[in-house]
Image (cartoon, helix red, strand yellow):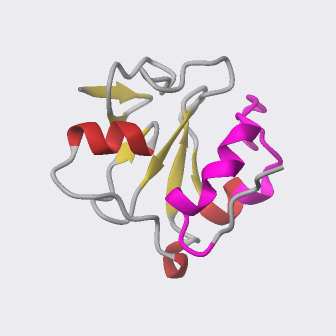
Amino acid sequence: MRRDVHGTTVVGVDVGPDTRCAHYDGPTDVIALRLGCCERFVPCVECHDAVADQGSEPWPRDRFKEPAVLCGACGATLSVEEYLDAGFACPACDAAFNPGCASHYDRYFEGVEPDRS
């Protein structure tokens, strides 16, 4: 499924207008991420695996200054550095981001260790 979210195409399973999906649909699940393998925005790696024809690869470390995170609340695109420094809230609109995403950072961002606390 493809959905236009604030002018950006997001692909996944049952993608909603704020980037929530069939796998993550809580009130703070409002980001989509670009993966290094296809550079498409997806709500989660499970969505990627459901719609892609290749395995997932995290966003490359040498591209952390490029836009790779989409805020589904306002449409702002953030670099990985901006996202990681944001403290689980969009710096553009202050929408809360799911802190549980930190436990999956290694799946999305090359060389970033997940927070398992």
**Left/right of residue 16 with respect to residue 112 in the rendered view:** left
Is residue 84 shown left or right of residue 35? right
Q: Residue furthest front?
A: 116
Seen from the viewer's position, the closer of residues 75 and 31 is: 31
- The tally of labels here is 0
Which residue is at the far left? Answer: 53
Relative to 97, residue 104 above or below: below
Please report the residue visible at 50 percent of the width from the left and 56 percent of the height from the top: 68
Q: Nearer the viewer, residue 34 or 116?
A: 116
Note whether 3 is above or below 47 in the view shown.
above
Percent x, y of residue 67: 51, 59
Q: Does 5 sit left or right of 67 as displayed?
A: left
Residue sitting at x 73%, y 28%? 95
Residue 1 coordinates in the image, percent (x, y): 23, 26
Based on the displayed image, in which of its 4 quarters is residue 64 positioned? bottom right
Magenta extent: 84-111
Percent from the top left, x then y, of residue 48?
32, 44
Q: Position of residue 38 (x, y in %)?
A: 27, 59
Q: Which residue is found at the position 51% from the left and 58% from the top?
A: 107
Q: Residue at x 76, y 39 (%)?
A: 99
Which residue is the extreme one toward the bottom? Answer: 62
Magenta highlight on residue 7: no
